[in-house]
Image (spheres, rainbow, N blue to C red):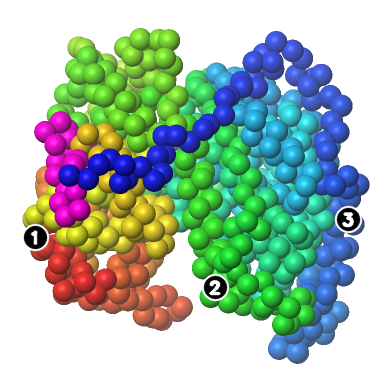
């Protein structure tokens, strides 16, 4: 039998993490006005003198690259360069930030009042702040926060102002501009606005990329954007978008700056402000349009308690170190720098790999609160058919077991040690009482019948079974968003546990093949770095050997007696996703999908899933998540089981390879072995 040392190459538990400081503690005892009006003199990049927003615009308008693109567009369209120049100025006016210290001070004062009302603490790792301060002086800095809430970019700016660091300029979506007063305030506190998509608009791309690059190259301020491109409604990391990362890496790759410091920032909310809003969006209820009036209507949240926030500023990552031995930058000397060129495949692979590494760095520094463990256990209990919930003492015992397992797996867990587990758990349940209740000593999700109580003398309208199901699904998806925060800790081990469950024998090679199939199938769902199958398998093996779940030798993987509980838990983590992907496959094979467009896909499959839930053929209501459904379709498109064909009016229609989709459903259901010839081709 091989010793555990075989897998001791990288123990995630040994990762050193910084201590936290609550920045609201001082705010509760000193004047907010004095804080807002304090002497603010941040140290800038190599002693640079701050530049006005108008000067920045002029630098963009005079750039060689922009002039080259203007001339290109003029030749292609026959439009005079003067007219295009006017269009460029309009784009820049719409886009540019107008950072003003007076607005920043006003927001610092206002946010102090709001944060003290909403949150019990905002905890920041001060060592991370010190590292960031050093990085800002040495190289251009890019801040890359995780994105789970509207609050994220306000929070980062507030923290940097608190510690006297240079405020970032922040890439924000155009939808915030519709908020009139608030939109302008965001612009004056450092936001620059970009369109959600600008496809083949060469001119817009040139203005946008040049604007960002000039800010970065000259070190006027740290540039901040969200690698995932949008907020994660399901509270798990999204596949990174590469557009902005390409732009900020370009000056380094072309030798215009010596290095760029990439700083992952992990923001963890004990209770998310938008929890039910996100759940409704995932069920197809459109989100309210961003507006100032909508913001004021949301003031009722100020009477709620949202617990603590932990913000972890990660180790700055050097673009130069990442590129060493991987990228030959001399290729950029072959053409003038101002001529735009499509990145070579080597560069695209490097940027993609960097993006995945940075999102993983965000994940590894996310702080998990006790509630995420409770939500995980309560959802698994619900799926097992225990409608009456769990006895509180049993939930406490299981939570302590899961706390210890999470720590063995390297989770960054914030569990107060000086308080008895029963009190930690009752405090967590109290904070999340909108989702959970204690009745007769049992803990249950709040899945009461939809519609609530009628006022005296009034009758409520009849509630259909579908309405009731969707109301319950809001609670289940809200809980799932907390469970999802644990996925980065368990997903590799869950894939291995499921591979052991699927495999007909305990041969290590067969289990690895099944692991690789599942990992490939779910690579749109979780952050799994391309090409890292072997490392992920070895990491999962190491953790399961270390926790006493498995014994592994050169040829075989054996489950220990005490490992059965851990293996069952890990298999249950992946099970909702497996069933969700199966349902997508079944829908594409059973329903009439001829001429089905991408836009029609989600409403059609939602109807199909609701039908199966109501007749009891499906046990996971979280399969109703549009996020999961779209990821499943993306996987089938990537694997070639579904194709996109251009239909009428620029809409794509789906063409289904029924044999392939059927086979994938059977494999996920354990009816076909993963040695199936189809899987070998994948």
Of callouts 3 and 1, which one flags the residue occurring earlier in the amino acid sequence? 3
Instruction: Specify the segment rendered in magenta.
Output: 550-569
Disc 2 packing (10 Å; few <14; some 14–19; many ≥20): few
**Could you tell which of marks 2 and 1 lies nearer the N-terminus?**
2
Residue 2 image-quadrant placement: top left
The residue singled out by tag 1 in the image is 671
| Residue at 33% from the left image edge and 29% from the top image edge | 373
Q: How many marks?
A: 3
> Is 386 or 519 nearer to us in this picture?
519
The tag on residue 54 is 3
The nearer-to-camera label among 2 and 1 is: 2
Task: Tell me, yes or no, if residue 209 can be seen here.
Answer: no
Quick one: quadrant of the C terminus?
Answer: bottom left
Left or right side of 176 for 499: left
Q: CA distance from mark 2 to mark 1?
A: 40 Å
Q: Are marks 2 and 1 in contact (CB under 8 Å)?
A: no
Q: Is residue 177 above or below residue 531?
A: above
> Which residue is the site of mark 2?
346
């Amino acid at each position: 039998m091989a010793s555990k040392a075989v897998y001791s190459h990288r123990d995630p538990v040994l990762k050193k993490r910084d201590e936290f400081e609550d920045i609201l503690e001082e705010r509760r005892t000193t004047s907010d006005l004095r804080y807002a009006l304090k002497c603010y003199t941040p140290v800038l990049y190599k002693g640079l003198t701050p530049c006005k927003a108008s000067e920045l615009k002029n630098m963009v308008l005079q750039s060689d690259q922009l002039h080259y693109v203007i001339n290109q567009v003029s030749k292609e369209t026959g439009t005079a360069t003067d007219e295009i120049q006017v269009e460029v100025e309009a784009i820049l006016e719409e886009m540019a930030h107008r950072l003003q210290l007076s607005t920043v001070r006003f927001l610092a004062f206002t946010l102090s009042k709001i944060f003290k009302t909403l949150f019990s603490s905002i905890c920041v790792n001060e060592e991370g702040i010190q590292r960031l301060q050093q990085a800002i002086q040495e190289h251009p800095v890019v801040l890359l926060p995780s994105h789970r809430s509207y609050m994220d970019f306000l929070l980062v700016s507030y923290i940097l102002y608190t510690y006297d660091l240079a405020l970032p300029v922040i890439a924000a979506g155009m939808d915030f501009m519709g908020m009139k007063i608030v939109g302008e305030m965001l612009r004056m506190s450092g936001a620059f606005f970009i369109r959600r998509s600008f496809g083949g608009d060469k001119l817009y791309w040139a203005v946008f990329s040049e604007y960002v690059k000039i800010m970065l190259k000259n070190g006027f301020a740290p540039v901040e954007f969200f690698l995932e491109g949008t907020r994660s409604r399901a509270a798990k990391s999204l596949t990174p978008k590469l557009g902005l990362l390409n732009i900020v890496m370009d000056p380094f790759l072309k030798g215009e700056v010596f290095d760029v410091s990439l700083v992952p920032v992990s923001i963890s909310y004990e209770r998310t402000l938008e929890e039910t809003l996100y759940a409704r969006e995932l069920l197809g209820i459109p989100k309210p349009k961003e507006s100032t009036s909508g913001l004021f209507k949301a003031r009722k949240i100020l009477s709620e308690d949202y617990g603590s926030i932990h913000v972890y500023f990660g180790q700055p990552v050097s673009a130069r170190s990442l590129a060493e031995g991987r990228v030959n930058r001399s290729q950029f000397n072959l053409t003038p720098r101002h001529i735009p060129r499509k990145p070579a495949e080597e560069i695209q692979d490097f940027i993609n790999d960097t993006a995945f590494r940075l999102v993983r760095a965000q994940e590894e520094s996310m702080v998990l609160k006790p509630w995420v463990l409770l939500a995980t256990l309560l959802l698994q209990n619900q799926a097992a058919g225990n409608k009456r919930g769990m006895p509180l003492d049993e939930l406490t015992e299981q939570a302590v077991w899961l706390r210890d397992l999470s720590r063995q797996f390297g989770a960054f867990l914030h569990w107060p040690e000086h308080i008895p587990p029963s009190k930690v758990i009752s405090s967590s349940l109290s904070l999340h009482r909108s989702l959970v209740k204690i009745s007769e000593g049992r803990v249950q999700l709040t899945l009461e019948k939809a519609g609530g109580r009628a006022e005296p003398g009034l009758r409520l309208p009849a509630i259909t079974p579908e309405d009731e199901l969707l109301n319950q699904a809001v609670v289940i998806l809200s809980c799932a968003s907390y469970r999802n925060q644990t996925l980065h800790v368990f997903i590799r081990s869950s894939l291995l546990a499921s591979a052991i469950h699927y495999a007909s024998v305990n041969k290590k090679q067969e289990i690895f093949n099944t692991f690789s199939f599942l990992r490939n199938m779910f690579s749109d769902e979780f952050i799994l770095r391309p090409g890292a199958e072997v490392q992920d398998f070895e990491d999962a093996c190491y953790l399961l050997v270390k926790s006493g779940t498995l014994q592994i030798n050169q040829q075989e993987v054996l489950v220990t007696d005490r490992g059965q509980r851990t293996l069952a838990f890990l298999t249950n983590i992946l099970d909702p996703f497996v069933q969700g992907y199966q349902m997508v496959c079944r829908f594409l094979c059973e329903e009439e999908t001829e001429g089905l467009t991408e836009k029609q896909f989600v409403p059609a499959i939602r109807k199909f899933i609701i039908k199966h839930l109501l007749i009891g053929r499906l046990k996971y209501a979280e399969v109703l998540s549009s996020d999961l459904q779209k990821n499943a379709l993306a996987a089938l498109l990537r694997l070639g089981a579904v194709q996109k064909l251009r239909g009428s009016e620029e809409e794509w229609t789906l063409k289904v390879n029924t044999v392939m989709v059927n086979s994938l459903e059977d494999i996920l259901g354990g009816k076909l072995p993963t040695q199936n010839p189809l899987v070998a081709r994948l």
